[in-house]
Image (spheres, rainbow, N blue to C red):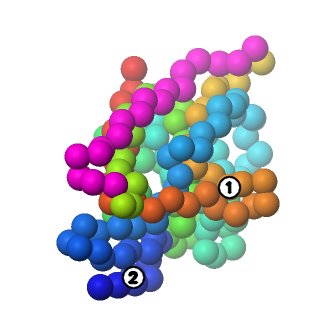
Amino acid sequence: TFKLFFTNQTTFTMSNDVAFRSLDVTASHSGSCSSSTGGLYIGHTGFSYGGECPGSCGKVTVKMNTGTFRPNEDSAPCPGCGREITIEEAILVDCSCTVKYRFQGQSKGNLKTEYHSSYGKDSNGNRKFKRIGGRDEYGRIKWRSYHELRFIAKSK
C-alpha cells in the first residue's frame, strides 16, 4: 500500500510500518554563529529547526528550545509569516541532543542512537553550533527515509 501526504514530508505505508522522509541525521557540520545580519536564519539557544519558508522570508530557523522533537510530526511555522517551513536541518546551540532513529527497511530492533552537542565559543567570541542535515554542495536537501526519528534536546 502506498499513501502520499502533502505536508512537510512524504509518508509511505509499508507492512504496518510507516516510513517518512526527513533530514539526514548522518550529515552533520560544526561551526560558529556569526553576528546577526537582521535576517530570520539565526542561531537560537537550544534546539531549532532550519529550512526554507514557502513564502518570501527565505531561509529561517524556528526555535524549539528543549524536549523531544519529531520532524515528521512537529509544526515549524516561519517566524516571519507563520507558514510551515520544510524542515531541512536541526541546529544545536548551547545544548546537547540524543538522536534516535531507524532507517526505512531496518527491523524494529535496529534503533540507532547518536549523541551531539554544541557548547562554548570560538576564538572570536562567537557561539558554536552543530547542524544536522542541511543541503549538499549542489543545494539539494539531504533527505533520508525513516521508520523512526526523534531528537531529545537538553540544556546544560
Residue 121 on the magenta span: yes
Q: In this view, does 9 lie above or below 147?
A: below
Q: Is residue 40 shown above or below 82?
A: above
**Residue type beneath disc 1:** Arg
Percent of width and height locating residue 89: 56, 51
State the mark number for residue 135.
1
Res. 5 mark? 2
- Per the rendering, the mark at residue 80 is none
The magenta segment: 106-123
Residue at 27% of width from left, 54% of height from top?
A: 107
Quarter of the image where the N terminus is located: bottom left
Residue 126, located in which quarter of the rendered image?
top right
The prevailing secondary structure element of the residues shown in magenta is loop
Q: Residue 77, percent across and down?
A: 48, 64
**15 is higher (above) or lower (below) than 58:** below
Q: Toward the viewer: 135 or 94?
A: 135
Task: Assess whether mark 1 and mark 2 are in contact (beta carbons under 8 angstroms).
Answer: no
In this figure, what is the number of numbered marks?
Answer: 2
